[in-house]
Image: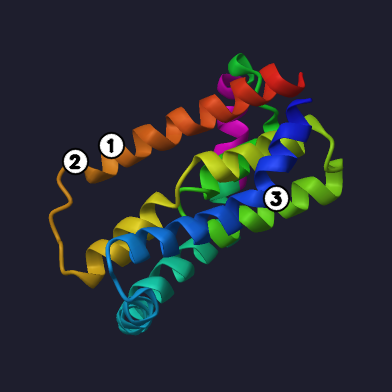
Amino acid sequence: MFAGIINGVSAVAIPLLMLAIIGHGWYKKVKVYEVFTEGAKEGFNVAVKIIPFLVAILVAIGAFRSSGALDLITGLLAPVTSLIGMPGEVIPMALMRPLSGSGALGIASELISTHGPESMIARIAAVMEGSTETTFYVLAVYFGSVGITKTRHALPAALTADLAGIIAAVVVTQMVFG
């Protein structure tokens, strides 16, 4: 029943969202297409501006994975994460997600192909993918694109939110599918 509801909502969510945006623009007398194309132009300029930050973060992530530090940290954290029922196979995903969305997606794809899409490991990885953020990527790219150098409490707050998302992903997935 739960899966049926989710499938039904998923099938109509995007079309309803598009209709809601167009309807809201029509109600507010906004030229939706013109505003959309202006936003797309600004988005292109931002994309060009963030390329150096993107390259820097991708190089750092590649060095982190290649050095073996990810495997070392995974081994050290396994006894702690087992307390909340997090399988050890998911730890690299939890560590990579704040660094890189594509890196985390690669790990999730690997977990799904190795353990099967119906496995608890794959389900936890999928929920974790949706309930956490690419914190370092966001801070580097977006703060860098507008020239913010003093992030103040942004990093600790974002990492705390990521930790909450990771724990919630494990607990909720085990409650729903366990």
Distance CA(mark 1)–CA(mark 2) = 6 Å
Describe the element under mark 3 as helix, strand or loop. helix
Q: Residue at x 56, y 53 (%)?
A: 16
Residue 93 is drawn in which quadrant?
Answer: top right
The residue that mark 3 highlights is 11
Closest to the camera, between mark 1 and mark 3, is 3
Q: Is residue 118 left or right of residue 81?
A: right
Identity of the amino acid at label 3?
Ala
Residue 67: image location, x then y, percent: 56, 58
Identity of the amino acid at label 1?
Ala
Residue 61 seen in this snapshot: yes
Residue 145: image location, x then y, percent: 24, 71
Rate crowding at label 2 as few (under 14), some (14 to 19) or many (20 or more) other CA atoms within 10 Å: few
Disc on res. 89:
none
Q: Which sits in the foreground, 61 or 176?
A: 176
Q: Is residue 146 left or right of residue 134?
A: left
Q: Is residue 22 left or right of residue 112?
A: left
Q: Residue at x 69, y 37 (%)?
A: 6
Residue 114: image location, x then y, percent: 85, 47
Closest to the camera, between mark 3 and mark 2, is 3
Distance CA(mark 1)–CA(mark 3) = 34 Å
| Upstream in sequence: badge 3 or badge 2 | 3
Residue 72 seen in this snapshot: no
Q: Residue at x 60, y 20 (%)?
A: 171
User: What are the residue bounds of the magenta stretch?
Assistant: 71-81
Contact (Cβ within 8 Å) of mark 1 with mark 2: yes
Q: Main secondary structure of the magenta part?
A: helix
